[in-house]
Image (cartoon, rainbow, N blue to C red):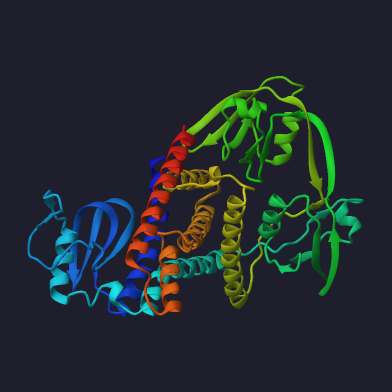
Amino acid sequence: MIFNIIIAILILSAVIIVHEFGHFIIAKANGVCVVEFSVGFGPRIFGFRIGDTDYCLKALPFGGSCRMLGQDEYLSDTASDSYEDDDGEGYALSDFEKRNKEMLAKYGESRTLEKKSVSARIAVLAAGPVFNFLFAIILSIILTGVGGYDPCVVNEVEDGSPGYEAGLRDGDEITALNGNPIFFTREYGFYRNYHEADTMHISYKRDGAVYNTTVVPKEITDTSYKIGIRFDQSLRVSEIVQDSPASESGLREQDKIIAINGESIDSMEKLTELIDASEGNTLKIRVLRAAGEREFDITPQMMETSYFYTGMTLYGNRVQASPIATIGYAFCDVGYRISSVVEVLTMMVTGRMGVNNLSGPVGTVSAISSVVEESKEDGGFYLFLNILNIAIMLSANLGVMNLLPVPALDGGKLIVYIIEAIRGRPAPRKVETVINFIGVIFLLVLMAFVLIKDIVYLF
């Protein structure tokens, strides 16, 4: 368990450090004085100085920071090692604050970020997310080169199904969905997960020729014993129906079902079969959660459920690509991950998805730890591939999240600078301060909510 958590923290920290390194390298290139570049947070363990920058390792091995000259605005170029506010109360300055004062005394404000041109400030702020995207692409090239990619191939089409009636057959490769090119099975799966009832306009390839068709999913009503959950192909609970046996049992989303009545579960079909065959008798359902395995007594109920059926099965088998194609698929992979994050965020804003789906550092480390634990059974090679996959996902997510137009994030500051570039002069300082204050409060409240949710989920 400790090993899994360490791996999870290292992955998340690497993604954050890459982000901060983006700010660092572009700040240096634009003549901004970087006072401190740190790996980790908290008390300083050791470090060294090259030029004006302190490079240091800190006690908490979680992420890092790039701190530029002038970030503590109340500091002047005086030599005092303490600060006194308007009420006459003071405190000792930190090492960073002392270095900041020292560099301000040396350069004045000429090498602070705010004194650089608006284009330079935009470049410095945008560099963090851009480096995350570049890091994701590099890792995706490695992942695709080693593990291949998953072309959107239809493996099975049931006779008489909507897919069959639309002309699709085993072995056809879907190349576009509703006019948008798709390259991977997971793209199709993502769309179906959130748009299962929607008509699909599909382009597909067969024997080198491209055809177009339309698939209208058919609603199927089924009455059988259910516990009130939806689950994905990895057997993780993706949704719990309100007021269902599962919701009252303590089962949680993201729990992975591993056994029912002591019988191991290795497929969606087996899971469904055992629940259907319960005849209303209580089942002992064992799940894997971040804090360990848990077992719940759940009594299935006869329920009427409906789902939308296409009759098409896509396994997502991976195949190898040429070196040039590998690079192209890596770009497409990162593009898909970015677009899926944007779509999920859009669904949250519009109310189609709740904020309960958000995870903070605790939830992220917990989820990574679970994946690492599951991967061990498959051997070191698959563990390596899963670690790469997680790092790509996190790096793309962090890049997108930091570009959100929220004050106190890179995206919020970028909006301010872009407006300045258009207006030809900066926004009033008081207005910017108020906006940033509101943004910080919003982020603190959201972070507290997500942290509490993640901690509750662990147990």
Q: Quadrant of residue 30?
A: bottom left
What residue sits 65% from the left and 32% below the top? Answer: 242
Q: In this view, does 4 lie above or below 99?
A: above
The vertical placement of 244 against 439, above or below, is above
Identified at 41% across, 42% down, the residue is: 448
Looking at the picture, how far across and down is residue 387, in whole percent? 49, 55
State which quadrant residue 57 falls in: bottom left
Identify the residue at image location x=56%, y=63%. Answer: 338
Query: On the rendered structure, is 63 left or right of 266?
Result: left
**The furthest residue to the left:** 79
Q: Tell me residue 458's x, y (percent).
A: 46, 36
Indicate whether 440 appears above or below 116: above
Question: What is the x, y in percent for residue 51?
Answer: 18, 74
Residue 336 appears in the rendering? yes
Q: Confirm whether residue 172 shows in the render.
A: no
Q: Which of 315 and 434 is in front in this view?
A: 434
Q: What is the quadrant of residue 63 in the picture? A: bottom left
| 398, 258: nearer the viewer | 398
